[in-house]
Image (cartoon, rainbow, N blue to C red):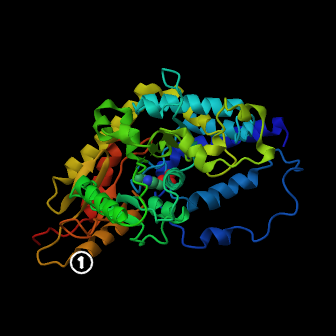
Amino acid sequence: MTPDEFRILGRQMVDFIADYWQSVDQHPVLSRSAPGDILRALPTSPPQQGLANSTSPDPWHDIFQDLRSTILPGLTHWQHPSFFAYFPANISGPAVLGELLAAGLGVQGMLWLTSPACTELETRVLDWTAQILDLPAAFHSTSTDGSTTGGGVIHGTASEAVLVALITARDQARRRSPDSRPLIAYASDQTHSSFLKAAIIAGLADSPDDHRHLRLIETDSTGALRPDALESALRADLAAAHSAACPPADQPWLHVDAAYAGNALICPEFRSMAAGYAAADSFCFNPHKWLLTNFDCSCFFVKHRAALTNALSVTPEYLRNAASDAGTVIDYRDWQIPLGRRFRALKLWFVIRHFGINGLQSYIRSHIRLGQLFESLLRTDPRLEVVVPRTLNLVCFRLKPLPAESPADTDARNRTLMQQLNASGALFLTHATLPKSHPQGPRLFLRLVPGGTTTTETHIHQAWQNIQATSHPMPDA
Ligand SMILES: Cc1ncc(COP(=O)(O)O)c(C=O)c1O
């Protein structure tokens, strides 16, 4: 494809994307494809003759046709304003342009040398981000007194960030106490599955149920980790270790996985959530969830970059160069799992420059207001209840139990409600269960997170009408 051919097809593709954004709300949010539908619509063998030599004035006609007829119907529309499932993965024009530019520049930034701008823009943008979130000074790569002990890096996902944190923690513990005593990882019993997976990949745990190496600490009725329970677990493990022959590596590594909620720190009024962050060794949040930056973009900050590079740096001769050897540059390959890395900082740079801090703050606040609105609507209907207090814009609710109804039947009615709503195509929401330690037991509930780029009050009112029309019967019926 020549640059001039690329210009023509590129404009067609940008038009295709813009048309999609303008009409995304016409699609059912959750794809109606059955398993295998898309596979069956695709040829089993690749074309022998490509389009490159086509003389047609519209050489990609068939590709665009297939996008419309096969790919779009097979999408669950994450950018639909009534996508309320999981956590959002919201996007914006500036981010998508950054993504396009990163692909077009085709840079692989594993070392400073392999593209100084890829490294230094990332360092600057992550320092901006640390400022915007008001993170402790130790997480900045360049502190005002010129010392540089910490810093940030863009990973693909929060899963990689927690894995890197665990590997670094393991390395530190082994350096301090080189005996082969098993290490223990602690997290809330509401922790994300990525923590358990990382513990397995890092070799700390044998399975998600490996209670010898994993402590999942009880949460309170609001879903928050109970500090007293954490303290007791730590004390018990330390006492057991001290009574054994070798001294334990008793300085834990504290990683804060704020994949979703961390985005709200951009607004000063939510920063009480970050009280105590100064004690953390590492922190991660995902602009690819809630900060208008398309997947993937997960910002990972550490207080001591040396701990990270001690754990992850492996330097064969072919990667050596004068700048790296002099120690005057950052080589982000030593801050992450893969060697290669994309130029992800471009999209975050464009987002911050386009929206500015004020724009990003109003964006987060608009979603919080939508969460408040939905919660207030819920409270008007006696058939429904909010099961844990709303956190930011995450609302957890369910149909109340009917008199004499078994917990399993209440769960089944809630599951049916969710399935009916999702099958309607008008909205998409997902479920979770309360922890076993919750006073109501491990009950199923539904969760609604209004966080789409174009979600407005209208979509919340529509969702509410659908929920009301589908929720039956009354608890006293
Ligand atoms: C707290 C938390 N951690 C980790 C993740 C996983 O994120 P990623 O897909 O970036 O690995 C999520 C996703 O929702 C999350 O909410």
Specify the farthest residue to the top: 145
Above or below, 242 against 144 in this view is below
> With 94 as the anchor, is 462 left or right in this view?
left
Q: Where is residue 445 in the image (x, y as percent from the top left)?
A: 28, 64
What is the quadrant of residue 426 in the picture? bottom left
Work out whether residue 19 can be spotted: no
Residue 74 appears in the figure = yes
The verdict on label 1 being within 8 Å of ligand 1 is no
Extreme-front residue of the structure: 245
Q: Nearer the viewer, residue 206 or 416?
A: 206
Q: Mark 1 points at which residue?
A: 409
Quarter of the picture containing the C terminus is: bottom left
Figure quadrant of the N terminus? top right
Residue at image position (73%, 31%) is: 323
How many marks can you see? 1
Q: Which SS class for mark 1? A: helix
Q: Which of 477 and 407 is in front in this view?
A: 407
438 versus 163 height, above or below: below
Tag 1: amino acid: Asp
Q: For the residue carrying disc 1, how many other residues have a C-alpha within 10 Å: few (<14), some (14-19), or many (20+)?
A: few
Residue 143: x and y, percent? Answer: 49, 25
The image quadrant of residue 44 is bottom right
Q: Is residue 238 left or right of residue 322?
A: left
Q: Which residue is drawn at 46% across and 50% down?
A: 80
Q: How far across and how far down the image is residue 166, in percent? A: 49, 55
Q: In which quarter of the image is residue 225?
A: bottom left
- Vertical position of residue 270 compared to residue 339: above or below: above
Q: Is residue 33 left or right of residue 318?
A: left
Name the one closer to the observer, 356 or 183: 183
Picture coordinates of residue 428, whole percent (x, y): 40, 58
Q: Name the residue rendered at 90%, 50% in the picture.
A: 53
